[in-house]
Image (cartoon, grey):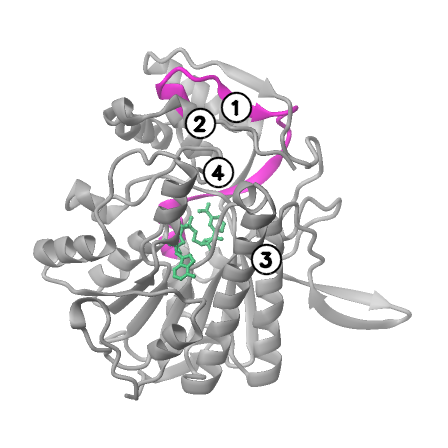
């Protein structure tokens, strides 16, 4: 099946029409994948999600609690259909299996897993979220390190070969992380840096130095993508995303059962989400070491916006386009203080604890990343206001009885 035509205008590539655009979301059951699926479905895209429940299995295996129970991906897609009349197609499959990945792009294969649905045609865009996303998980021990390395790299490698072999015009939107850069003592550019050496200049990927094996796989992903772009002219947008916070997106207003997976433990919960849960059950906020660790943060609604704008204005063939996907930076101390201030105004007695740092990381450092590219293509940032934090407190407060204090901090060291 043909894909909608793209046109070039003012240095960017725009699509002629998004009518019947087919978007494939790898990792569609996840914290970001499911809201992304609903977002595009709501806009009238033809959406297919793929997942093997890796994250749910990890939650069970590691015995970490979710804030609330989340229906299976198939149940959620049925609920979405019954509430909106729109269809999100579901494929349950492991994307480290090259056959599964290739089936998604090979229109000759009549693929009929899950719900006996058939494919709509080649995806114009694929959003690649399907990875093991946790630094502590990757460093529990050698077993989890191996799972992280094989899972993440194999999925990415399967993806670039499938696109090369069956659908070379498909735009790959890949989720990278700001953690790829580490905390260098110079300004962080958006992916690329011009280097002058012995009187000659060239452009290179910005130096990367990860502080976990998970982040190392993201660096390797970027290198695999860059290889595919150079060798086979693939079109790739790599989004260097900072830690995401938030629960609700516009689709949650339709029905609370559509809420995304939300973890609050040290392994799978991101820092602000964790802090709010800790505050609600009067568990002192776990700041590691001095708390000067500074990172770029992002509201979950802005993940959706950033992916959507990248989809509307895709990378060119033969381009690896990199955006730093953050909207503001905070130190761990600043985040803890914000949560404390809002929590106390709502009647919670929020304490802050400085634990011996279980991680190997700089606790005080220079941090100055650039993050203009996504704004330039139309993203309008949501900032971390007291109102946003209060809204999260209200949702988390509703599930207070589900919160398990024993899973909040286990002290995974590296
Ligand atoms: N959440 C954040 O703060 C954040 C920050 C920076 C980057 N990222 C990146 O964004 C992406 C999505 O993150 P998330 O927080 O939604 O994580 P998540 O674990 O909730 O989502 C990933 C999904 O991919 C699925 N998956 C993993 N391996 C798979 C495989 N082999 N086959 C099929 N499905 C598989 C998982 O089951 C899960 O549902 C990840 O690549 C992560 O590295 C996330």
Q: Earlier in the sequence, mark 4 or mark 3?
A: 3
Q: Which mark is residue 286?
A: 1
Q: Are marks 4 and 2 in contact (CB under 8 Å)?
A: no
What label sits on residue 408 in the rendered view?
2
Label 3 sits on a secondary structure element that is helix
What distance separates the C-alpha of mark 1 from that of mark 4?
A: 13 Å
Where residue 189 appears, x then y in whole percent? 65, 56
Q: CA distance from mark 2 to mark 3?
A: 25 Å
Whether pointer 1 and pointer 4 mark residues with C-beta atoms closer than 8 Å, the reply is no
At mark 1, the secondary structure is strand
Q: Residue at x 32, y 44 (%)?
A: 261
Q: Residue at x 55, y 44 (%)?
A: 135
- What stretch of residues is rendered in magenta? 278-305
State which tag comes first along the sequence, 1 or 3: 3
Chain-order first, disc 1 or disc 4: 4
Residue 366 drawn at (x, y percent): 71, 38
Mark 1–mark 2 contact, CB under 8 Å? yes
Q: What mark, if any, has residue 126 been given in the picture?
A: none
**Ligand 1 within 8 Å, label 2 CB:** no
Q: Is residue 23 above or below residue 338?
A: below
Q: From this viewpoint, is residue 31 visible?
A: no
N-terminal of the pair, mark 1 or mark 2, is 1
Q: Which residue is tagged 3?
A: 217
Q: Which residue is mark 4?
A: 267
């Amino acid at each position: 099946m043909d894909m909608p035509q793209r046109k070039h205008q003012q240095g960017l590539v725009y699509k002629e029409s998004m009518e019947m655009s087919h978007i494939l979301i790898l990792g569609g059951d996840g914290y970001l994948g499911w809201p992304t699926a609903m977002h595009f479905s709501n806009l009238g895209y033809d959406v297919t999600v793929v997942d093997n429940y890796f994250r749910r299995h990890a939650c069970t295996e590691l015995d970490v609690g979710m804030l609330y129970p989340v229906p299976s991906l198939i149940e959620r897609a049925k609920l979405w259909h019954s509430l909106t009349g729109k269809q999100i197609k579901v494929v349950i499959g492991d994307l480290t299996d090259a056959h599964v990945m290739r089936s998604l792009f090979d229109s000759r294969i009549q693929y009929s897993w899950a719900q006996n649905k058939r494919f709509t045609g080649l995806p114009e865009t694929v959003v690649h979220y399907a990875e093991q996303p946790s630094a502590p998980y990757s460093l529990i021990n050698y077993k989890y390190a191996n799972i992280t390395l094989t899972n993440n790299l194999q999925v990415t490698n399967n993806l670039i070969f499938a696109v090369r072999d069956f659908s070379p015009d498909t735009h790959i939107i890949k989720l990278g992380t700001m953690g790829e850069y580490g905390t260098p003592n110079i300004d962080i550019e958006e992916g690329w840096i011009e280097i002058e050496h012995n009187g000659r200049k060239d452009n290179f990927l910005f130096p990367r130095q990860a502080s976990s094996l998970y982040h190392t796989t993201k660096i390797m992903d970027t290198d695999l993508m860059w290889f595919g772009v150079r060798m086979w002219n693939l079109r790739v947008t790599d989004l260097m995303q900072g830690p995401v916070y938030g629960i609700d997106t516009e689709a949650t207003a339709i029905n609370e059962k559509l809420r995304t997976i939300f973890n609050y433990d040290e392994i799978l919960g991101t820092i602000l989400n964790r802090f709010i849960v800790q505050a609600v059950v009067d568990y002192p906020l776990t700041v590691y070491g001095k708390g000067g660790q500074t990172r770029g943060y992002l509201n979950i609604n802005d993940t959706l916006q950033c992916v959507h704008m990248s989809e509307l204005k895709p990378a060119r063939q033969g381009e690896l386009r990199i955006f730093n996907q953050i909207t503001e930076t905070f130190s761990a101390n600043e985040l803890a203080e914000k949560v404390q201030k809002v929590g106390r105004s709502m009647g919670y007695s929020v304490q802050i604890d400085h634990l011996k740092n279980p991680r190997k990381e700089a606790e005080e450092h220079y941090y100055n990343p650039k993050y203009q590219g996504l704004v330039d293509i139309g993203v309008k940032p949501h900032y971390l206001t007291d109102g946003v934090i209060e809204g999260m407190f209200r949702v988390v407060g509703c599930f207070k009885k589900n919160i398990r204090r024993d899973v909040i901090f286990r002290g995974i060291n590296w």
